[in-house]
Amino acid sequence: MVVARDFGGGSVSGLLRSLWRYRHFVLSSIRNELVTRFARSKLGGLWMIISPLAQVAIYALILSNVLAARLPGIENRYAYAVYLMAGLLAWTLFSDIVTRCLTLFVEQGNLLKKMSFPRITLPAIAAGSSLLNNALLLLAMLGIFALLGHGFTPAMLWLVPLAALVTAFALGIGLALGVINVFVRDVGQAVPIVLQIWFWLTPIVYPASIIGEEHRRWLYLNPLYPVVEAYQRVLLYGSAPDLGGLAYHAVAVAALLLFALLLFRRAAPEMVDAL
Amino acid sequence: MNGLVVENVGKAFRAYRSEWHRFGRWLGIPAVPTEESWVLRHVSFAIPRGQALGIVGQNGAGKSTLLKIVAGTMRPTEGRVVAAGRVAAILELGMGFNPELTARQNVRHAAGLMGVVPAEIEAAMPEIEEFAEIGDYFDQPMRTHSSGMQVRVAFAVATAWRPEVLIVDEALSVGDAYFQHKSFDRIRQFQRQGTSLLIASHDRAAILALCDRAVLLDRGRVLKDGVPEEVLDFYNALIAEREGRTVSVERLRDGRARTVSGTGEARVEEIVLCDGRGRPTDQVDVGEAVELHVRVKVQRPVPTLVFGFGIKDRLGQTIYGTNTWHTGQVIERPQPGDEYRFVVAFRANLGVGSYSIVTALHARDTHVGGNYEWRDLALVFSVVNREKTQFEGCNWLEAKIAYERQQRTVLQGV
């Protein structure tokens, strides 16, 4: 038996195959991350629910009652809070994955230098962990929504493919930036700033309608806008997303992810040299 | 059949005018590196199954780069590495252990990182727990473990499954003496079952004890490849000869290599071993009083002259050695043409076997910095046992055994 020692490269399908082979490791790493986070705290796993609950409750109460913010055209006084949370849910998932992937390879440098294992598992663990946190945030939100009289609608099932779309998009960007960050560390400093600007350029805190008609077409240059809008539609209005627009988006995301995987495949062998 | 083949391996670190050129190259845009530094070049060797190869070399010689390439974490720029199966590395024990998790959970994680599936991990778990021997601590968070316990767990999981190739770094010199013996035993057991070992160590004794062959790396090239004793002697001479002065190797009749190095300010002209009656000999009895006569001639003026000698066993391990620096007999300002006769009297309290004498002439307490002459295998002699009781080992300790019969205790009633 001759074993070629090749974990970083091969084809993109080879990458996915080695990821499948290491699926148990990925899953147990995600679980370990959760366990560690709450180890040595009295309430343990309860904190997984408490902290997103508090975050959501603060938004709901302060924004709706104290600031009395209203969305034009909707009667429910909590509509703005729901709108905001919907946008935040999408944004948190996106920025969490991008930020994690960005510093992933640099932080795990020592492990990469010493142990031979498929490197693709690292971003997979990061994405899985972010998704899990996001699911908990969603659960907390649905609970608060129910208290506010905004019940569950079947349209919310659209969140599953939507979350997959956000994850793929974030992974595409995060993976490419994470690889480049190994060689040019300025990227790691610049991206958080860019993310902040990006956040305010996306209609999350404000409704898209406050942008004047003549400027609104610029919004469509924001690749995150279609998904964020879909989240808001699904959660606030309980209606299906605009499938036509999202289809284009999905194709673009798939292309981006493929590009990132190719880049990763080429760069993986050189990463250890620069770490 | 070979367990590991390293074929013309080379590693270059490339620098580009701008990192954008590097990125461009990934996308297929040709870019020429502005700088290419080869840290490893034309390295070839093969380790047959069940054999051990030692890698020696100074810091920066390319040892760790080579180990990374064999371990698979770094890709060679040219050449290739072929292994007959799984390659495991005991490079840095306890890598990636999470202090908040228990040893058991960490073992699952570490084994997962090695690519072992859950069923196999659970099957091996009792054996790993037993090997680590840390009792109840196995289910306690690792932050409560002593560093010795962590090493035990790390070693137990790293060697739970027999690899075809095992890379052993300095890591072996950690842990308590008991566990060191235990881990050595396991490594030897693997070796008997066909695992090829690649050992990088500065520990002369470890290389001599474990390796069938050694490779000396210097500035990324294989400088010497041969039996461990010869390679280590050459390496030893090389350390003293950093400025690149003479190292000569002479082949003895029995096929062994005598390495002589040094700057030549003083030289050993003659060396004789004499028995109890003053007659030259090359065979001495266990415990016999003998004298080593060494004639040294000074060639060029030096501030100080220290004479040292050592006795090595068949494998090249030093049994005993000292010098006139330690005995407070440093010769100040010897002049060219001066001759000195050193007489070393000692009792050959050695085990039966073949031994060699190494002589050294240098300026201070060690031969590093001012090595006039270092002569390995300056003289070979054997020790035979003609009148002492039968014994094993390399030392004649003249042990006395006493015994007495214990009274039997008789239990009465109950």
Image: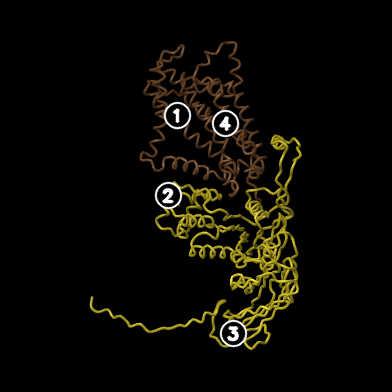
Mark nearest the camera among 1 and 2 is 2
Asked which secondary structure carries label 1, the reply is helix
Asked which secondary structure carries label 3, the reply is loop
Q: Are marks 1 and 4 on the same chain?
A: yes
Q: Are marks 3 and 4 in contact (CB under 8 Å)?
A: no
Q: Is residue B341 left or right of residue A103?
A: right
Q: Position of residue B9 (x, y in %)?
A: 72, 53
Q: Nearer the viewer, residue B318 or A170?
A: B318
Asked which secondary structure carries label 4, the reply is helix
Which chain is represented by brown in the image? A
Task: Determine crowd level at label 3: few under 14, some 14-19, many 20+ residues with C-alpha closer than 10 A.
Answer: some
Residue depicted at 71% across the width and 54% down the height: B220
- Drawn colour of chain B? yellow
Quadrant in which residue A211 is drawn: top right
Q: Are marks 3 and 1 on the same chain?
A: no
Mark closest to the chain's N terminus, 1 or 4: 1
Which residue position holds label 1? A138
Which residue position holds label 3? B288
User: How are the residues colored?
Assistant: by chain
Asked which secondary structure carries label 2, the reply is loop
Quadrant in which residue B339 is drawn: bottom right
Amino acid, disc 2: Pro
Mark nearest the camera among 1 and 4 is 4
Task: Determine crowd level at label 4: few under 14, some 14-19, many 20+ residues with C-alpha closer than 10 A.
Answer: many
- B410 vs A112: above or below: below
